[in-house]
Amino acid sequence: MVLVKLRKRLKSLISKMFKKKSDVKIGLYGPVNSGKTTLANKICTDWLGEDIGKASVVPHETREIQVKEKVKIESNGKSLTFNLVDTPGIATKIDFEDFIKHGMKKKAAKQRAKEATKGVIEAIKWLDNVDMVLVVLDSTKDPLDQVNITILGNLDARKIPFIVVANKVDLKSSKASRVREAFPNYKTIGISAKTGFNVEELYNHLVDAV
Amino acid sequence: MMKKKRGEKHMNLKIKFVPYEKFKENNLGKFMKELKHNTIVLIDAKLSADEEAKLIKETMEKVSNDFSGIEMNSLELSTGKQESGIDVVKNMIIERITGKKRGLTIIGPAKTVRQIRKNPEELLLYM
């Protein structure tokens, strides 16, 4: 067990040493429906002129890892090229009946639930492949949800740098300050991926962080 | 035991206390079996981030039409000097339940937890 962990750590160190700057992978992580794909689309349309995937109010719209390569952002006279990794939302429960409530047929709902469970597993596995993470949280919801704590705890334990993104600040019920207060030791930026509010600030932090 | 609506059978709900050492010894598959059978599990420690991630992965592998997953909550004993009144009470409860100073993890089947949340006054505990 210890040997396996050591080998993993050594492999990751060596690959980091020889990694080109353009090979950097930035992952979007967060709970379901926090706006990860909306943010990924915002980043991709701003810098590549095209979307990465479909965003939806129906939970688990993103059920597979989606990668957009060579995204080059420029901010404050600096630039950064990276591969953007949009991941399915992390959840501890997936009930096919919830999809039926969103108007899906029973068969389709069961299929979606099945795919969603695989998506969560893939997202957790991909934690070993990303170099930096944007933890996208819905600022209208309680930030101290167990899923958020598990994601942040895993990033901390794996020493993966990250920025907490308090998304959906355009909504009336948004409380970005609550996210900041919940995680005072982490860098937190309030944005609206939908309207683009403060996304420029996020780009400034990104080019400095990597 | 939790009452169900008129005409429905009572739902048997078990609360099981699992020492952290036993949780670590057993494989997660065995542990998941308990959760699938309407049991709320209390572990006398806060799980590590890695253990939580493994538990989520294992849960996702076991999700089916009858088992929708889990709700989990890890409570850590606060060790800071400037503890709030709530922290002091929380610590007292955790220490009283576990007898140890290393936190508490509560894990339950998602559907059961949802039912308890809907009708908390219908939860009857026989001790």
Image: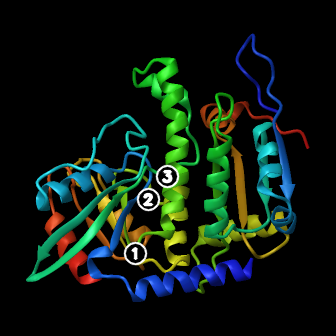
Which residue is identified by label 1? A131
Q: Are marks 2 and 1 on the same chain?
A: yes
The image position of residue B56, as x and y in percent, is: 62, 53
- Judged by depth in the image, the label closer to the viewer, 1 or 3, is 1
At 74% from the left and 76% from the top, the residue drawn is A1
What whole-number distance in Å separates the C-alpha atoms at marks 2 and 1? 24 Å
Asked whether residue A57 appears in the rendered view, the answer is: yes
Q: Residues within 10 Å of mark 3 (few under 14, many from 20)?
A: many
Q: Are marks 1 and 3 in contact (CB under 8 Å)?
A: no
Q: Say which amino acid is labelled 1.
A: Asp
User: Compared with residue A1, is residue A168 higher up or lower down, i.e. above or below?
Assistant: above
Which residue is identified by label 3? A90
At 54% from the left and 27% from the top, the residue drawn is A110
Disc with the residue nearer the chain's start (3 vs 2): 3
User: Compared with residue A132, is residue A119 higher up or lower down, i.e. above or below?
Assistant: above
Which label sits on residue A143?
2
Work out whether residue A166 or residue A82 is closer to the camera in this orientation and state it: A82
Q: Say which amino acid is labelled 3.
A: Ile
Work out whether residue A78 or residue A30 is closer to the camera in this orientation and state it: A78
Q: Are marks 1 and 3 on the same chain?
A: yes
Number of dots carrying numbers: 3
Determine the residue located farthest toward the top in the rendered image.
B7
User: Compared with residue B103, is residue A185 higher up or lower down, i.e. above or below?
Assistant: below
What whole-number distance in Å separates the C-alpha atoms at marks 3 and 2? 14 Å
Q: Is residue A107 left or right of residue A86?
A: right
User: Compared with residue A80, is residue B45 higher up or lower down, i.e. above or below?
Assistant: above
Q: Residues within 10 Å of mark 2 (few under 14, many from 20)?
A: many
